[in-house]
Image: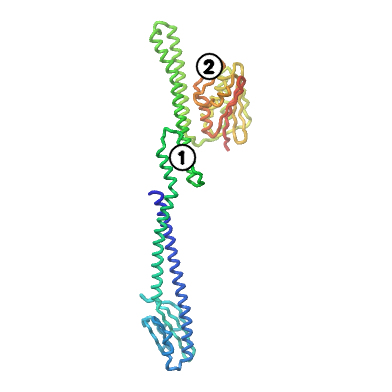
Amino acid sequence: MPIKWRLVLLSTTLLILVLCFFHVFVYQLFERWSIHTEQDVLSQKLNTLSEIYVNRDVDPHLKTWLQPFVDEGQAIRIIVEDEVELEINHGIPENLFLTETDSGEPVNQVKQEGEHRISVLTRSLSGPGERRVELYTDFTSLNRYLDTMLQALMIGSSVLLLVVAAGGYWMSRIALRPVQQISKTVRKMDPSRMENRLDVKKTGDEIEVMSHTFNHLLDRIYAMIKKQKQFVADASHELRTPVSVIRGYVNLLKRWGKDDPSVLEESLAAIEQETARLERSAADLLKLARLENEPEGNLSPLDLVEEVSCRVDRWRQVTNRSFRWDPPTTSIKARISSDHWGELVDILLDNGVRYSEEGTEVRMALRQQKDEAWFEVENDGKGIDEDDLPHVFERFYRGKTEEGQPTGTGLGLAIAKEITEKYGGSIHANSEPGQWTRIRVKLPLSH
């Protein structure tokens, strides 16, 4: 069901409930007020009748005196010692009169007998013996007035419901018109044109917020698409180079490798080198894919100091570089996978060793800075040019060694960036060309 019809149905249903409550309230209030008002008038009339009786109880023409006070639909009875002394009846059924057992205290009530609603009022009269006057009034006409009023309320409410339903439908169409325009705009958008965005009108309402939110979503989607396209292009270029080299040496082997041992040895060595490069590139690409799609899960706090110390000890055994590492005296913990943290440390140490000068040391520091853990790896060497510094964390960016040759797959620091951001951290690079390079990782501490 469209939202506009749901809004109309909801508003109409709510109005029906309110009107039902209002009708019951008005009907009950008017009924009680009408009965109370009539009872007051009849009570005054009964007092007047009582005074007439007291002043003219010996008058043989008493009935003539009382006749004008009794209207159509009323009856008056004067009871003396449980005997009816006088009765004037203009349309009240006799079965509704009080019996001897009902006599006693003054009565002020409304009786409902079938279709008849009768008001009964009694007063005691002064004089010898037990005397009272009874006034009966037919309130059936009041029921007709109440029924007429109820019909008027129902007719008015029906008209009001129609007006509200039509008005609600019209207002909902106006209110939802921007949403329909957004839907039409989205349907007309060309997915290949990444510059498409919704026109946001400054209305200050939820439609403006929704439009901004949708545009932000498009920004993220198109950024991801652009990133994927760039990634595929870079990966294709990166994998094409070793494949081309391997194909070239295969052709060389076909021509001269069978008869020339030196050509055979050179070709096999080159093929082996390029194959290893392909394996490294494929492995790094798989790491990036896993990092993008792997859920974090519930992780226990990891002691960063202990893991760094283990990784440094391993690197000291496999490289001729020296490492300066003074571990903190207190543990520094963060919520990160031990495998990811170890891989991050290895990437930074490998980067420091690869781009440092012979005879220099790789310096490391791990410290707590407010609510963050800072891990730094610094090396002396050629450094990074100022133009290249913003791109060091991009995929397939490859720096140059001291000999000026590009090395690695160009994915190491990109993987480090993915790992860091996966756990809510950040990574930064600083460099002084020709002197030093520093990579700093910041991770939120676990509490």
Location of residue 182 with respect to 43 vertically, above or below:
above
Q: SS at mark 1?
A: loop
* Secondary structure beneath label 2: loop
Residue ID for mark 1:
198
Between discs 1 and 2, the one toward the N terminus: 1
Q: How far apart are marks 1 and 2 (CA)?
A: 47 Å
Look at 46% across and 89% down and name the residue there.
Answer: 53
The local crowd at label 1, few if under 14, some if 14 to 19, many if 20 or more residues have their Cα within 10 Å, is some
Disc 2 residue type?
A: Gln
Q: Quadrant of residue 142?
A: bottom left
**Residue positioned 42% across, 32% down in the render:** 192
Q: In the picture shown, does residue 22 fall above or below 228?
A: below
Circle 1 or circle 2, nearest the eye: 1
Q: In which quarter of the image is the C terminus?
A: top right
Q: Where is residue 266 in the image (x, y as percent from the top left)?
A: 45, 10
Q: Residue 405 carries which label?
A: 2
Question: Left or right: 114 with respect to 280?
Answer: left
Residue 197 lies, in percent from the top left, at 46, 37
Q: Can residue 87 be seen in this view?
A: yes
Q: In terms of depth relative to the viewer, which is nearer, 47 or 310?
A: 47
Establish if 263 lies above or below 166: above
Q: Which amino acid does label 1 sit on?
A: Leu
For the residue pair 111 and 142, the one nearer the viewer reads as 142
Residue 305, how many percent across, how many down?
59, 29
Please tell me which residue is depicted at 45% across the width and 72% down the height of the picture.
32
